[in-house]
Amino acid sequence: MLGQQIISGLATGSLYALTAIAVVVVFRNTRTINVAQGDFSMIAAFIAVLLLKSGANYYVTIAATVLFTVALGILVERLVMRPIADSDWLTLFTATLGVYYIMHGVAGWIWGRDTKAFPVTFDPTPIHFFGVIVSEGHLINMAWAASIGVVLFLFFRFTKQGIAMRAVTDDPETATLMGIPVRFIVLLTWGMAGFLGAFAGILIAPILYVSPQMMDEVLIKGYVAAVFGGLYSIPGAIIGALMIGVAENLAGGYLGSHYKTATAFVMIVALLALRPKGLLGIQNRREI
Amino acid sequence: MGSHLRCENIVVRFGGVVACSDVSLDVEEGRVVGLIGPNGAGKTTLFNVLSRFQDHDQGHVFLRGKPIDRRKPHEMIGLGMARTFQNINLFHDQSTLDNILIGAHRLTGDPISNFYSFPSARRRERALVKRAGEIAELLRLSDELDNAVKNLPYGVQKRVEIARALAGNPQIILLDEPVAGCNDDETLELRDVVRKVNSELGITILLVEHDMSMVMNVCDYIYVVNFGANLAQGTPQDIRVNREVIKAYLGEEAQA
Amino acid sequence: MALKNPKARASAVVHDRAAVAALKSRFAVQNFYLVVFFFALLLLTPLVPGFKGWMAGQASLVIVYIIAAQGVSILSGYTGLVSVGHGGFLAIGAYAAALLTKYFAVDLVLAVVTGAVAAGFVGMLMGLIFLRLAGPFMAIGTLGFAFFVGTVVNNVPIFEGREGISLPANRIFGVVIGDIGFYYASVVFLALVTLFIFSLVRSSVGRALKALRDSEKAAQSCGVNRLSYRTLAFTVSATITGAAGALNGLVVHYVSAEVYSDIWYSVDILVAAVVGGSAMLMGPIVGGAFVALLPFFLETFADFSFILKGVVLIAVLMFAPAGICDVVARPIRAYRRRRLERAGAAPGESAATPRRPFGLADQQGDA
């Protein structure tokens, strides 16, 4: 039973991780706390439902949705973020809040505010895995999340754009001097946010059902996970997300489902009180 | 005259880089002491350690003989130490008068009486404004009191920084590159100001500076640092002819 | 002496300090009358023909929003900090007042004051945890706080969760007051809070806070204890928002977790402060009114109110970052600046109104 809950927690946690990674990447590269990240997923989920209902194949749907959401991310960057790119972080954060409101309103207007089921469900037959019962859905989620994680790792390590992105993170001015097109990197960053958001949305939709407010709680948990990594470290964010997934599942099982979401917050307040810079956070600067 | 500000064997590391490796200096009361060295020598780091804006890894700092290693930056003015900033850290949108008044913050008393404008607080405020006027007059800023500092010429802004530092009634002022970016006229003006502050108000001064004319003309004693360590010390005459110092500044092609 | 700055030529004009002082006090008096006029309008509103009783209740709710926005503005406008969790203080204020009213039948004034004090106390404690954090971390931490409070009121039995607590009629000094009476009471509270903020900003405390906001290092070198003053600002901010929360519960005679565990309240108040202008006295009034009235005007189009809120927010950030009030006040300020320049002063754009929505100076990065 315990193993069951842990596996299930890891599965949900790996979905939170997708949001958390997106949040970290955007913050690292642009100093922006993107509160619209969840809504990228939400819109992706709606688009996916639309496509699936009109008979498209599951994999085609994924591809089309991802493309759409990436375009959406780039659109947000162009229209909203670029004009205010030199502002302080609070302005940037509040601008994404505006985007959040707009996306919520648009989704509610087009699709209505009640929840809908996602048309693809996974085979509920339990699979036995090292003595623990896992469902197909869990495995698929974890598999997708893991593959995306690997893709990202390869991207940042070995591709020109990935390395350039890391340079921009560390020192944007020097990066510009070295000929790295920072604006393009920012564009790429928001595109990546859309990319990750799309997957998060499509994979979470069967669990959470689709509605404009579906990602609100996930977004918050994604941020809490990101803070575990000091808003800077992707591995930290992933670990944080997995921990949240497991912790809230255990809390839900032993304390009651009311306490599930509160768990994330107790964790974050405790963490911030004890280690203000996150678990694997930014290196401590010595200035007082 | 005793030691006013002293540090012993200061070591500061940033990750793998050693900014200060065993630096010591001693500023005598009532003197104007200069801290010079080539770029990257660790002067600014040391300066920040002395004013407590930077933690040090090893060594000790003493103000009037008492250790201040654990003190926070905002406590320093209460102990009689003021500092200025290299890149003019004034409150840009506020007036000269307001900037000087904030410098006198520690003399304003508790928040409650201030907030409710008790007569005692109002009296104090009037006294502070009067004092600000006196300081402004000393530094020839009387005409600029109502002007926002961002509208002032660069050299004048530098003087406002010093005025603000004076407002807290310090016994020692640390000046961070006071004439950086100033033209010749402004530099002369500030040289005059520094001498006046030291001779008329009896305030000890430690200044970090690149401009040699300023340093040689104003300082009673000079410390030279290079590569984060002490290189030489002495009066301006001594330093002027010191081979090591000349070599440090001009590189290997130094000649007598 | 070579003048580098063309604007500095103003000091070449004869600097008449007395004239400058006279002008400044005249402007201050003008501002004062403007505010008095506004409050007079508020007080006279119920006398307008066609004013129904229920409108008084709605108007009170708008005032509540405004007071909450004023609470946030102390942090975001005058101290340069951001809290996305002030809904937590609303909740604390509301529930403290509600419990006192239900079980001890206290006076309205006492209930509100207690709610405010309770929120302020918790604010002080929270400040100790959150104020050490850099900007983004503090924002997330405060959000966590709001969420935590929401969970507590949802699950701890005394607060009756979603069932809610119904409250008896409100009394002031023993006299039962209806909706219109409550409206006047809330106008009085608004006036008190506005006066308080006005005095705070002009006091040496306000000076220290603004110094911290404009340049933290310089302020510290002047002796301003960053943590102490920030905690003070946080506590005051929480207290004001707590008072708003108390009024909020008492005006509808009902508190329930459905309202107070909704974290979007916190965000709404922040939006109100930003849109109106956090560093101006009238800013939260404009912003609070905007956010509070939006759902009314677009009642059938709830989604449009969302979209409109987002669009206005982004537009304000792009074109009027210091808030709507700032834009409206610009021509007045320009005129006044010209008058002052003719008397020989070269004033800034008024020390109280920086260009950015949260009053941050040119330094970017962490708060």
Image: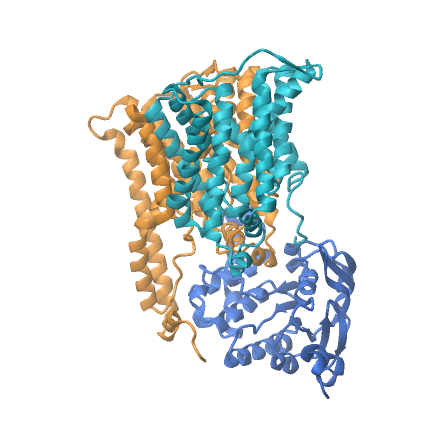
Q: Nearer the viewer, residue C195 or C212?
A: C212
Chain C's colour? orange
Question: Do we see residue A231 in this rendering?
Answer: no
Question: Which residue is located at x 71 percent, y 54 percent?
Answer: B15
Residue A108 image offset from top left, x and y in percent:
36, 25
Q: Nearer the viewer, residue A37 or B106?
A: A37
Q: Is residue C315 above or below residue B183?
A: above
Residue C251 image offset from top left, x and y in percent:
39, 23
Question: Do we see residue B250 in this rendering?
Answer: yes
Q: Nearer the viewer, residue C150 or B200?
A: C150
Q: Which residue ends up furthest to the left in the rendered image? A: C49
Residue A233 image offset from top left, x and y in percent:
62, 41
Q: Which quadrant of the rendered structure holds the C terminus of chain B?
A: bottom right
Instruction: Give the chain letter for blue.
Output: B
Q: Which quadrant of the rendered structure holds the N terminus of chain B?
A: bottom right
Q: Is residue B145 above or below residue A170?
A: below
Question: Which residue is located at x 43 percent, y 72 percent?
Answer: B143
Is residue A164 left or right of A58 when viewed as pictured? Answer: right
Residue A266 image offset from top left, x and y in percent:
62, 28
Instruction: Give the chain letter for cyan.
Output: A
Is residue B22 left or right of C173 when viewed as pictured? Answer: right
Specify the quadrant of the image occupied by residue A125: top right
Q: Nearer the viewer, residue C65 or A15?
A: A15
